Amino acid sequence: LQWLLDNYETAEGVSLPRSSLYNHYLRHCQEHKLDPVNAASFGKLIRSVFMGLRTRRLGTRGNSKYHYYGIRLKPESPLNRLQEDTQYMAMRQQPIHQKQRYRAAQKMDGMAESASNSTPHTTPEQSVAAQCQHHQQFIDVTHVFPEFPAPDLGNVLLQEGFTLNDVKTLQVLYRRHCEATLDVVMHLQFHYIEKLWQSFWSPKAPPSDGPTALPSSEEEPEGTLPKDKLITLCKYEPILKWMRSCDHILYQALVEILIPDVLRPVPSTLTQAIRNFAKSLEGWLMNAMSEFPPQVVQTKVGVVSAFAQTLRRYTSLNHLAQAARAVLQNTSQINQMLSDLNRVDFANVQQEQASWVCQCEEGMVQKLEQDFKLTLQQQSSLDQWASWLDNVVTQVLKHHEGSPSFPKAARQFLLKWSFYSSMVIRDLTLRSAASFGSFHLIRLLYDEYMFYLVEHRVAQATGETPIAVMGEFGDLTSLSPTLLDKDDIELGTEGDPGEPLVKRERTEPGHSLQDI
């Protein structure tokens, strides 16, 4: 409240874009490490401070936006030094050079002052900037970036011309590089990732009068590494393994920033931006590392591929969740689903088919069936369904907690869950159930969410990140040996060959939600 009173005042005949006020507020919260409220709550707050404030839609057709009419920035407010949307975002586009950003914005002082008290036409750049500001409320901008482990060189001998200081320099530089990557993603400036990777892996040669790197890097442990040294260091197996671990930490942090809650509704524009970002990652990295040995490139691209796949799966899961909310909130559809479900011959599904394939405990299956019907009858919300699914995973896997067989048990549970649910869907199909479309959508969502829960449980059990658990090669059994037990390696039993197929089904649901 005090911040509003210090920077704004009522005035007749002037207006301010609603997005500009909210952008200023977000910047204030970021500078003072405060948790911002959403745009709707901020609007109510402004109206409670400035009574009689009106809202108008100003601008040309197709380019108009909402303005608060009867309010302006105080002449002495420091916010006058900020240009609207585009200039504010420009201050954050180069995360490493903050002073340069601020000086660039200061050159626009005159323009910013006039822009804050007028209604100029919105440019495409301003629209994109405003959209990024709006999207930031859906991501986790307060995420703390974990520390990296130190490389374990063991008994590896560095070749002549390399010292431990070179390794320390690489540690410092790579941490800074990852922090810059995180900063850019946190501000939704996805296109800058390509430039960041190019500058780190394929830096341009310094000018002839610039500083040159010392051969042994003894005097500057935090300086720069020539490209040939960087390539040579990356060839060492311990360094490559360390870098892979760092990448797992970085990309897991980026996933948690971009998609902090897989079930929370987010704008389709943000979802599409994340999916486009995921689609570009492998190409960007391969171009940046074109001069590196194939083994190094394969390792790096493998991790970034797992990151891209995770983004695609989580955005698909989020899309399914938003579509399913409409079904779960529709009383008539729920009643129809209950009616159709009560006609399913569960005795035949369980006793004659699923029991032979899955070898599940009959008592457990019957309890899940009863709990499912009860939860459906109570017209539970999506969050309540998510809690129920989480409890199912806990019940099934509790006997394997702390055991080396936990990952295998988790994978087997996914296979059995998928088979059993497919048998129920099959029965509904044969009976031409009126609610088949609703059940199919719900099944897609619950299968995908169950997969999400299991991968996090396995990550917790193995002490790795979910991205590391899922692996770089699209196959759970191609992970590090810590995720496998001897039975998996020697016999490949209990449906291992089918796992990649199950995973692919969940990764990209091949059904149109609109058709359903």
Image (spheres, rainbow, N blue to C red):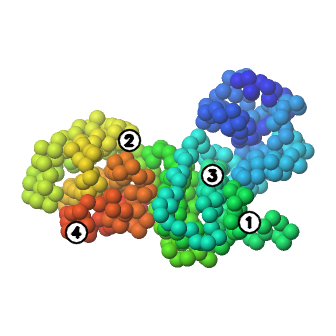
Q: Residue at x 70, y 24 (%)?
A: 1
What is the distance, in whole Å, between disc 2 and disc 1 at their CAs?
Answer: 60 Å
Earlier-in-chain disc, 4 versus 1: 1
Q: Residues within 10 Å of mark 2 (few under 14, many from 20)?
A: some
Q: Which of 14 and 457 lies nearest the eye of the viewer?
A: 457
Specify whether 68 is left or right of 260.
right
Please tell me whether mark 2 sits on a helix, a strand or a loop: helix
Determine the image quadrant of residue 467: bottom left
What is the distance, in whole Å, between disc 4 and disc 1 at their CAs?
Answer: 51 Å
Earlier-in-chain disc, 2 versus 4: 2
Specify whether 398 is left or right of 114.
left
Residue at image mark 2: 382
Residue at image mark 3: 179
Q: Residue 490 carries which label?
A: 4
Earlier-in-chain disc, 2 versus 1: 1
Residue 13 lies, with reference to residue 172, above or below; the image says above
Q: Residue 112 carries which label?
A: none
Earlier-in-chain disc, 3 versus 4: 3
Earlier-in-chain disc, 3 versus 2: 3
Residue 331 lies, with reference to residue 513, above or below; the image says above
Please tell me whether mark 1 sits on a helix, a strand or a loop: loop
Looking at numbered disc 1 in the image, what kind of residue is underneath it?
Answer: Leu
Q: Which of 365 and 245 lies nearest the eye of the viewer?
A: 245
